[in-house]
Image (cartoon, rainbow, N blue to C red):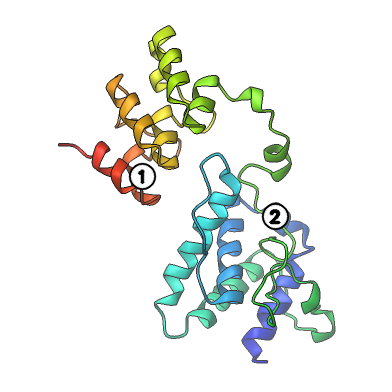
Amino acid sequence: MSHIQKQFNAASTWLSSAPAAAGLPNEVKLELYGLFKYINTSTGPDGSRPSIFSPAPRAKYDAWAAQHTKYSAMTDGQISASQRYIEIAVQIGWSGDIDEEDVDLENLDDEPVKSTGQERRDNPIGGVKVSVMSEEQEENKDEDETHPMHRAVAENNVQKVEELVKEDPSLIDLKDEFGYTPLHLAADRGHVEMTKLLLSHGADRDVQDEDSQTPLQLALISERDEIVDLLRPN
């Protein structure tokens, strides 16, 4: 094992229990998460990007993808990523000491199981969870808190949406707690007929969510080509 690998393992072990790590801003946690995943796998995330109804998994997916894109283009990508990870740990209080006896690789979260290619339960920086929306909040979120309009769009219930808009036309651009309008949801989910319906009722295709993204940008990110064609200016 190289010196940089030993440093990385020691830093990730320290981060797993350091109080300072628990209080880090979400953007730093997400960077550490992305670095950790890339360093341990040398790849980017596989599978489809999580829905905007799952903000924490979506943020983690994006963070991992961003670090993979950044470092995989370098000849020494994993080394550079490890150095950045270590740099952050030092900045928040890690002494830099390496005590190999304290590095419990078996219990490092996300440490790949080499023989099967599978990974341990998702946990970003050695024990400190990324919480864009805390997992407890996400798991316990009452479905009744979701407006019927947003729920109908997410379920691709065209008839229900038609009924709701006829009853209250203002619902066409109603924003949820994340700033998503029905058109944002339809674009992200890939609901073509729903998108057509919303546009026919005058949905604002230029409206932005809390991340300043329009429905078109979400469709581009999610590779919803047919919806991209519908939303692009003529």
Q: Residue at x 65, y 22 (%)?
A: 144
Q: Could you tell whether 53 is left or right of 165 in the image?
A: right
The image position of residue 183, as x and y in percent, is 38, 31
Q: Inspect the image, locate mark 1, and give the three-letter code of the amino acid beneath it.
A: Ala
In the displayed structure, 3 sits above or below 91; it is below
Q: Inspect the image, locate mark 2, and give the three-letter code of the amino acid beneath it.
A: Lys
Judge the density around disc 1: few (<14), some (14-19), many (≥20) Cα neighbours within 10 Å. Answer: many
Q: Which residue is mark 1?
A: 219
Whether residue 176 is visible here, answered yes or no, is no
**Quadrant in which residue 219 is drawn:** top left
Q: Which residue is mark 2?
A: 129
Which of marks 1 and 2 precedes in the sequence? 2
Image mark count: 2
Q: Residue at x 53, y 57 (%)?
A: 61
The quadrant in which the C terminus is found is top left
Secondary structure under the numbered disc 1 in the rendered image: helix
Q: Residue furthest right?
A: 101
Mark identifier at residue 71? none
In front of the other: 157 or 49: 157
Q: Residue furthest top?
A: 167
Q: Could you tell whether 190 is left or right of 94 in the image?
A: left
The image position of residue 211, as x and y in percent, is 44, 41
Whether residue 125 is visible here, answered yes or no, is yes
The image position of residue 105, as x and y in percent, is 77, 78
Q: Could you tell whether 28 is left or right of 184 in the image?
A: right
Q: Residue at x 65, y 84 (%)?
A: 5
Q: CA distance from mark 2 to mark 1?
A: 28 Å
Secondary structure under the numbered disc 2 in the rendered image: loop
In the displayed structure, 39 sits above or below 180; it is below
**Quadrant in which residue 100 is drawn:** bottom right
Judge the density around disc 2: few (<14), some (14-19), many (≥20) Cα neighbours within 10 Å. Answer: many
Q: Residue furthest front?
A: 159
